[in-house]
Image: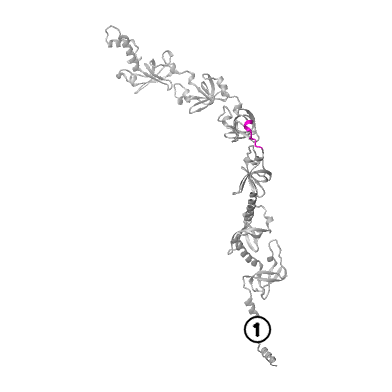
Amino acid sequence: MARAATKERTESSIAIPSREDFAAMLEQSFVTQSPQEGSVIKGTIVAIENDFAMVDVGLKTEGRISLKEFAMPGVPADIKVGDTVEVYLERVENALGEAVLSRDKARREESWIKLEKAFNDQTRVTGVIFGRVKGGFTVDLDGAVAFLPGSQVDVRPMRDVGPLMNQPQLFQILKMDRRRGNIVVSRRAVLEERRAEERTSLVASLQEKQIVEGVVKNITDYGAFVDLGGVDGLLHVTDIAWRRVSHPTEVLSVGQTVTVQIIKINHETQRISLGMKQLQTDPWEGVAAKYPVGVQFKGKVTNVTDYGAFVELEPGVEGLVHVSEMSWVKKNMAPSKLVTPGTEVDVAVLEVDSNKRRISLGLKQTQENPWTAFTTSHPAGSVIEGEIKSITEFGLFIGLDSDIDGMVHLSDLSWTKPGEEAIKDYQKGQVVKAKVLDIDVEKERVSLGIKQLDGDPIEKAGPSGSALRKSQIVTGTVTEVNDGGIEVELDGGVKTFIRRADLARDRNDQRPERFGKGDKVDAMVTSVDKASRKVSLSIKAREVAEEKEAVEQYGSSDSGASLGDILGAALKKKAPSKKKSDE
């Protein structure tokens, strides 16, 4: 009975709240326990209706989220009632009394955290290319949208990116700015890293001198790049064949499968040099015995350059015909005007160097040497006739037989005129005669002379047409008078100058004005230099010689005559030194 009384007092002491108080308390509990707006929270899918999912996040009412927000690009939404999902709470209650939720923003917030960690750790992330924008593409990185530049899609430019769209791909984050919401990614960096790994592994498995198959990937002027199954090797144009290959396209084409030998591997740079000709027999083995010096062979002109022509003796063996060995006479003609690529010619082997893989050939050696024939038909001293081909500052070039040119030097144009003046008397195309002075077959030169046709006038300017000799007395005509002396012309046109001091023995008579143009004078030849074409005369020397002769002749008589009488008699007997009267 006491226990029952106690129970009644306890129940009577508990206050039962009214309906209004209970509603207020419930509202307060929602306020104190509701999640904070702008945060990511967990919710439960309680229903799926009309392309929307109803999500309970513990608030007074559920929120609705479009099913599209649960889908990935190219992948439909995969959710069901009862699934727990993370959503972003934008507002606790809208005008309709519903919670405003977003799956996209929740995933974006979650993705940014993961992406920042991946960016800092330099790890790859998975994304899907879902759109095209100016300069590149948009990529969905599990909610976060990134930009993929067009240059970062692949290691090579891609014309069609369609097959990559809406397909999960690995990307490398190049740059990200959460404040601005910018992310830049690269698929190319992932591919290059993967290729580098594969390349390193493949290069390590290859060995020098190994024979492998590959596909011609690209062709350049200097060679071709061959894909060996993930790594490229360079097949240089000189290693394609033993014969001369002007351009790789003569032998190779893109996409062609070729068998090559690995010549060299640089493991540091991962460069591989390849060769095709190494798989064939070297044609240069025993080439010296096959092509002895001095023997003539037939060959095909493969290439013509400024310095000569290359002639193929057999596939892989070529020799050079230097421009100096192409013609005996056409020295200044371009090789392209003498031979043409593709034509067959006769050549003579001049030199063989097997170590350097060089053969010197001659074209002119297979033809008769016109210089030898010219020497036989036109020996030195013979007279030839030809057309002036050119006029230079040092002489005339005259065309002769067999396209040979001879040269007349300035000094061989005239006996009396300086070469610079004498050459003005000739014109290109003029036909002239000349004498062959010298023939040098080795140097292939013919020296001609025009003045030699008439003979040296010095040899005819003496008394009675004899050669001038020292101490001769000659007669000349005064052609010029000046204060220093007089100019005198002898027979044959030889001109000389008598100095003032040599005009007379007597000093008072050493006056040039005593003479006039046209006067005849007798003088003694004091020197003759044929090389310099110089003749020296002296009236004084003649008078001294005559006086000496008179003394010797009359001094021996016993007539008792004085020296004056002897000289007077001698002077009367001798001819006067000036044949024109002084009157």
Residue where numbered disc 1 is placed: 21
Across and down, in percent, residue 301 comes to 63, 33
Q: Which residues are magenta?
A: 281-289
Q: What secondary structure is found at the residue carrying circle 1?
A: helix
The residue positioned 63% from the left and 79% from the top of the image is 28
- Asked if residue 515 can be seen in this view, the reply is yes
Q: Check the image and report above or below for 458 versus 80.
A: above
Residue 95 lies within the magenta run? no
Of residue 89 and residue 514, the one placed in the foreground of this image is 89
Across and down, in percent, residue 526 comes to 37, 18
Q: Residue furthest top?
A: 559
Q: Residues within 10 Å of mark 1 (few under 14, many from 20)?
A: few
Q: What's the amino acid at mark 1?
A: Asp
Q: Which secondary structure dominates the residues rendered in magenta?
A: loop
Q: Check the image and report above or below for 242 versus 95.
A: above
Position of the C terminus, as image quadrant, is: top left
Position of the N terminus, as image quadrant, is: bottom right
Of residue 476 and residue 179, the one placed in the foreground of this image is 179
Q: For residue 299, which quarter of the picture?
A: top right
Across and down, in percent, residue 428 comes to 52, 26
Q: For residue 45, which quarter of the picture?
A: bottom right
Q: Check the image and report above or below for 259 versus 531.
A: below
Q: Is residue 445 left or right of residue 211?
A: left
Q: Is residue 470 left or right of residue 286?
A: left
Of residue 453 and residue 563, the one placed in the foreground of this image is 563
Across and down, in percent, residue 392 comes to 50, 28
